[in-house]
Image (cartoon, rainbow, N blue to C red):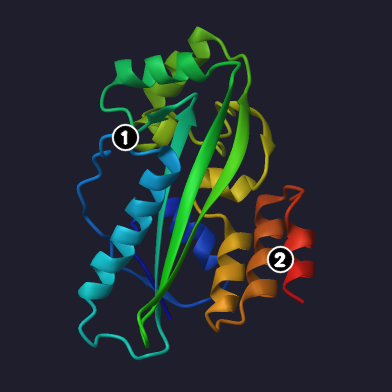
């Protein structure tokens, strides 16, 4: 059993592909960036803090064959972390800034095995190139309301806007849950889920993954 420390619909959708039972226990934390904190350090701290916060609330609710999974995703352009926009104007500014440019999407995964409170965490980075969308396309996308709960003010999978031209690295990482990396972490912690998760990811996303065969080979 996995306890997912997130209420993200996309993460729940992706995790359900694997056929592993899970329940949702979101973590609520102060997500302020510390002075001098780098993007990788920040996103790792957020994921680990969410995992520990949920683990502290378990109090025997699950048996020893359970794991807490937390994830945090940020968009980084140059050296700046671009969070979720709070207003349509902020969404407009972010989308204009990212247009026809490269940026990075970082997702940190943190898994705690409840039987011994052992934690594994890692940061996965994908390089993303945005297409040269128009101002009218930005306005239509903002009017849909979709940017307002998204890091970087966009969803890669949005069929109406389709903002991304190219991804180097894990595609699922850009949606908020790099499944191949998660499968490798779970296998390290005693969950035999690699083949199920990676195959389901390939079939669902219908995207050629440059990491899939390499990671399967490494774990066999």
Q: Residues within 10 Å of mark 2 (few under 14, many from 20)?
A: some
Q: Residue farthest to the front?
A: 36
Please report whichever mark, 2 or 1, sits nearer to the chain's N-terminal start.
Answer: 1
Q: Position of residue 113 (x, y in %)?
A: 41, 80
Apparent side of residue 195 relative to residue 128 in the rendered image (left or right): right
Q: Quadrant of the N terminus?
A: bottom left
SS for dot 1: loop
Q: Is residue 105 above or below residue 140?
A: below
Q: Is residue 81 above or below residue 18?
A: above
Seen from the viewer's position, the closer of residues 27 and 7 is: 27
Q: Position of residue 5 (x, y in %)?
A: 33, 63
Q: Is residue 54 above or below residue 166?
A: below
SS for dot 2: helix
Q: Position of residue 122 (x, y in %)?
A: 50, 58
Residue 8 visible in the shown view: no
In this figure, which residue is indicated by the disc labeled 1? 36
What residue is drawn where x is 40% and y is 36%?
A: 151
In this figure, which residue is indicated by the disc labeled 2? 199
Q: Position of residue 216 (x, y in %)?
A: 75, 68
| Mark pair 2, 1: CA separation | 40 Å
Q: Quadrant of the C terminus?
A: bottom right
Q: Residues within 10 Å of mark 1 (few under 14, many from 20)?
A: few
What residue is drawn where x is 40% and y is 83%?
A: 66
What residue is drawn where x is 34% and y is 31%?
A: 148
Disc 2 vs disc 1: Cβ atoms closer than 8 Å? no
Residue 194: mark: none
Apparent side of residue 18 relative to residue 70 in the rendered image (left or right): right
Q: Is residue 150 above or below residue 53?
A: above
Apparent side of residue 83 relative to residue 207 in the rendered image (left or right): left
Seen from the viewer's position, the closer of residues 107 and 208 is: 107
* Numbered circles on residues, count: 2
Seen from the viewer's position, the closer of residues 152 and 189 is: 189
């Amino acid at each position: 059993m996995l306890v997912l420390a997130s209420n993200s619909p996309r993460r729940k959708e992706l995790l359900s592909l694997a056929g592993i039972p899970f329940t949702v226990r979101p973590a609520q934390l102060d997500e302020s960036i510390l002075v001098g904190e780098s993007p990788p350090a920040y996103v790792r701290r957020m994921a680990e803090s969410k995992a520990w916060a949920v683990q502290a609330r378990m109090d025997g609710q699950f048996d020893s064959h359970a794991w807490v999974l937390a994830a945090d995703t940020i968009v980084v352009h140059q050296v700046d972390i671009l969070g979720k926009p709070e207003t349509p104007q902020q969404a407009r500014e972010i989308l204009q800034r990212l247009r026809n440019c490269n940026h990075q999407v970082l997702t940190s995964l943190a898994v705690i095995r409840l039987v011994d409170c052992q934690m594994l965490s890692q940061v996965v980075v994908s390089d993303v190139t945005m297409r040269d969308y128009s101002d009218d396309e930005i306005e239509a996308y903002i009017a849909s309301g979709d940017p307002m709960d998204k890091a970087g003010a966009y969803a890669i999978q949005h069929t109406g806007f389709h903002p991304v031209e190219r991804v180097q690295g894990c595609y699922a990482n850009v949606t908020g849950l790099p499944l191949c990396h998660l499968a490798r972490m779970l296998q390290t912690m005693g969950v035999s889920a690699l083949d199920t998760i990676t195959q389901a990811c390939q079939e669902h996303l219908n995207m050629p993954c440059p990491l899939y065969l390499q990671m399967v080979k490494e774990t066999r």
